[in-house]
Amino acid sequence: MLESPPAASERQNTAIALRHSLTVRQASITIVIVLVLGLLIGLIELYADWRAMRTAIVQQAKSTLNLVEGSAQEALFQFNDVLADQVVQSLLDTGQVRQVILRDDFGSVFAAGERDNVIDSGRLIQALFGDLAEYTIALRHQSTPGLPYQEVGQLAITLAMNNVAGGFVARSLISLALGMVRALLISALVVLIFYLMITRPLLTLHNRITGIDPNHPGDWPRPKLRGHDHDELGQIIHSLDQLMQAFQHTMAQRDQAHAENARLGAELQVSQRIQRILLPSQAELDTIASLEIAPYMEPADEIGGDYYDVLPHEHGIRIGIGDVTGHGLESGVVMLMAQCAVRTLLNTQESNIARTMQAINATIYGSGQRMDSGKNLSLTLIDYHSVADSAPSTSNAPAVCGELRVYGQHETLIIVRHDGHLEICDTDELGFPIGLVDDVSPFINELRISLYAGDTVVLYTDGVTEAANTAHELYGESRLVQVIQHHHQAPAAVIRDHIVNDIKQYIGTQKVYDDITLLVFKQR
């Protein structure tokens, strides 16, 4: 069953939540990536600057001490407290030294000084540069050239780290902040470029796709994306357009097929009705005094390829049963031609069955050549005659009530006598498939069978014996014979119903692949 296309309101309800949109996700990912990379690069730069700053602090401290080392040596060697105070003050005046202590060789403080109002370094500065705050050098003096140096004391300084490294921390924080701002700007630029080049064209394509009319996909509003004619997006649009055109072509073919199927369905219904009308009705069969006749036909498709007919005439009853190769409309047409030919020849009072079979063969063969269908059929014609008993009145033999004259090749005839005795008559030697060759008269032979009161005769097509169950096992002739023998004393209609019910029970839910035709008649 085909589903109806969605309504326009349903097709338009394709808005994507902002948090799920491609733009927001792409922007978020880009910002995170650029920020992380910017932070890593900034930290690497800060680490390099920190190492350089530490080296610079150490070099600067050593250089400052080297500048006053000689004056400090002279002050301690000469015990010149004025010179010592000048050394201390000169170090404090640099602004980078917080405390100066000048000790003599006995460890006593000879001169000392400390800057006032020095702001203590914070935890960050202490953590980064705290180990570089204190420096001490030994002071040695050579009183006479050539003599060894004599240790005269020590000079120790403590740097004002907030003054020395405070600028570095401030610069570093500013540099890190500028790096983050630069990363955000780069992210925004990347997002904008990505949006203009990819996201916006994709959104345009998405809007055009959601606007496709399911009933006319070939008329979809193909987008024109400037600058994307030869890239992947352009190829996607081109491929999508080809797909929509293919859909449109397929739908047109589908609609045409639906219209054709509807027309054929109507024709098949008419043909099926014609076929059923031409079959003998049960009321017509009930008027036959000498035989009980119960037919059954179930086509595999709308038009069956099986044939049967019962035609009373002046000298008896002509019974026909056949099976056209295949099934469907062509087989049904061949079946109708055979039926019409049998009726026509009977109405012309053609009594020679061999000529009748050849005339039917010529009709089917010629029509098959014209239609180029290659259809043929197996066909058995039976002439039934009601006869009087020719046995002496003193005989205990049962009375012969009728005689069958059988012509043509088809399935076997199953005969169950009134006493249950089974006879199976093979028809292979009685004829040749009708419509297969242009002349079948050399193959036509006759088989005569006497019927007694209560005898049952069953004619059938291969759709009965070849009916398969869900395990693909065939129903078979032996099972058919068992059902007939078990119910042979019942009326013909009851025997027919038992056979049909047994077939239905056997095949279960399996599909019927061939026409099923059955003709049961009993001698009254």
Image (cartoon, rainbow, N blue to C red):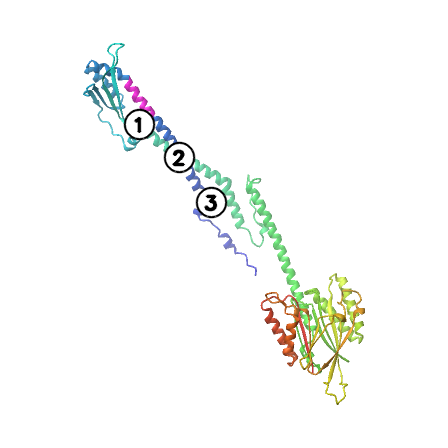
Q: Position of residue 492 (x, y in %)?
A: 66, 79
- Is residue 242 at least partly visible in the picture? yes
Quadrant placement of the N terminus: bottom right
Q: Is residue 424 left or right of residue 28?
A: right
Q: Nearer the viewer, residue 464 or 366?
A: 464
In percent of width and height, residue 163 lies at: 28, 26
Residue 343 vertical placement versus 237 (above, below): below
The disc placed on residue 22 is: 3
Nearest to N terminus: mark 1 or mark 2: 2
Q: Secondary structure at mark 3?
A: helix
**Is 425 on the left-hand or right-hand side of 178?**
right
What's the residue type where badge 3 is placed? Leu
- Tell me if residue 242 comes above or below residue 352 in the rendering: above
Q: Secondary structure at mark 1?
A: helix
Q: Amino acid under label 1?
A: Ala
Distance of mark 1 from mark 3, alpha carbons?
Answer: 47 Å
Q: Which residue is mark 1?
A: 165
Numbered mark located on residue 40 in the image? 2
First in sequence: mark 1 vs mark 3: 3
- The segment highlighted magenta reads 54-66
Quarter of image, res 440: bottom right
Say whether residue 178 is visible: no
